[in-house]
Amino acid sequence: MEQPRPLSDLSSPSQSAAAAAAAVRPASAAALALVQSRFRLALPEQDPPAAWRESLSGLLDWLGIDAEFVASARARRLPRLGEWTLSPAAGAPVFAPWLGWSPVAFQHGGLPGLPQAQFVASYLVDHARGAAPGQAGADVVLMSPHPATCTISEAGGVPIPRPAVLKAMIRTARGEGRERLAIILHARQRNAVATMLLAAGKGMTRDGPAIEILTIEEALAPLAALRAPWDAIIAMPDVRGTVFTLLARTAGVRGAWPMLWLTGTGDDGARGGIRLVTSEAPGEGVSRLPLDAPALIHALALTLHAGGAQRAAWRLHEAWARLRDSGVTTPGRGGEDAPYVSVVSDEAFAAMLRRDAGVSKRPQTRWQALNDGPVAFSGTQNATLRIVS
């Protein structure tokens, strides 16, 4: 591994990013930006699969980032469970998107060995393509409290998230500029969660998305529609598998989603600290996934964004969106759109992105998870103070 150099971003701003900058400034625009002098990633002790390692290295080289890879600290609890029990090294999240956690792993109190976090957030993003009829696109964050943070407040009650965790998830949606949030749960949980929101008053919901509380039965029909009416969803752990499956099916995404294991959020509404970056994929428990180029690209963009490299995150996302809009896709992403698309392997997709092979010139839809990406990319004065750590 080469010696790390300070994080630099040599890309030039694109016209579409500059044009979009004025339209995406969030109401609670940050007045302070923290830039890390080095982009650091913690890797599991076991080497990443070769295809993932090579694609990750290629993307970082293409972005002009010489990342510092550090060893993650092995958790003391449950060491037999292997690499997914690793703890983040100081100042660096564990980056392992080749580990695919199943949404059903959160049911019934969660499988033993779930990574420690307050809540998880997975991202379904698949922008509409002009050549594919009936494609509305998708941009949804699916959050759930960690089962360990859910408590039973009274005898005979049902587990509900702690108020601080629910507040953190709502603030995450608000920080990303999400407009409509659904809280999906079992009928026996609804009154308790509604009471919690009422007790918190306007402090929890002020300047945030419009919130609906629905039972899983009420949510089935909207979730099965061409496009769900929400851009943020909080699913209780036991219903996460159902929500994940329906969203993936309606969006035509059979591959993995990038998945963040998070601590809480600050009062400014910013996303909380990332402990671990994995993927979320159908199945049971945890598995090692074959290379999924979109999952790697999105996971890296989210990690760059959280690490202060907003410009690099936006550049990476825009390159993916342009290649996707140019009719190129992978087997796990909309292959049924043929003959309107060309299906290539995940390795080939990552290589084409690095060659700037996307020919589409149309402005691309922004990704709400990178809500300040165009602003950082265009060099506007949104952040009034930049601190280099």
Image: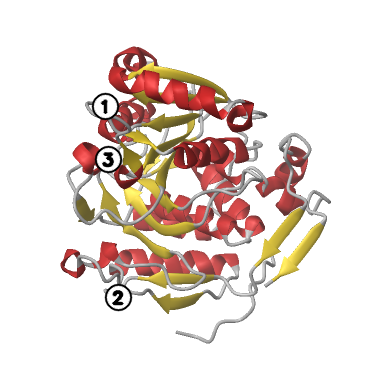
Could you tell me which secondary element the residue under label 1 belongs to? loop
Residue 34 lies in quadrant? bottom right
Assess whether mark 2 and mark 1 are in contact (beta carbons under 8 angstroms): no
Judged left or right of residue 18, residue 134 is left
Q: Where residue 377 appears, x then y in whole percent?
A: 71, 53
Q: Nearer the viewer, residue 216 or 303?
A: 216
Residue drawn where x is 30% and y is 43% of the image: 147
Instruction: Locate residue 18, reporting x and y percent.
Output: 76, 45
Give the residue type at disc 3.
Pro
- Which residue type does callout 1 highlight? Gly
Q: How crowded is the residue under tag 3: few (<14 C-alpha within 10 Å), some, or many (20+)?
A: many
Q: Is residue 81 left or right of residue 87?
A: left
Q: Which residue is mark 3?
A: 103
Which structural element holds mark 3? helix
> Tags 1 and 3 in contact by the CB under 8 Å rule?
no
Q: Is residue 367 visible?
A: no
10 Å crowding of disc 1: few (<14), some (14-19), many (20+)? few
Query: Which label was assigned to residue 45?
Result: 2
Label 3 vs label 2: CA separation? 25 Å
Residue 14: assigned label = none
Q: Return the residue at label 1.
A: 157
Specify which label sits upstream in the sequence, 3 or 2.
Answer: 2
From this view, report whether residue 34 is shown above or below residue 103. Answer: below
C-alpha separation, residue under disc 1 versus residue under disc 2: 41 Å
N-term mark: 1 or 2? 2
Side of 174 relative to 329 (left or right): right
The residue located at (33%, 35%) in the rendering is 335
In this rendering, is residue 52 above or below 171?
A: below
The residue located at (26%, 67%) in the rendering is 83
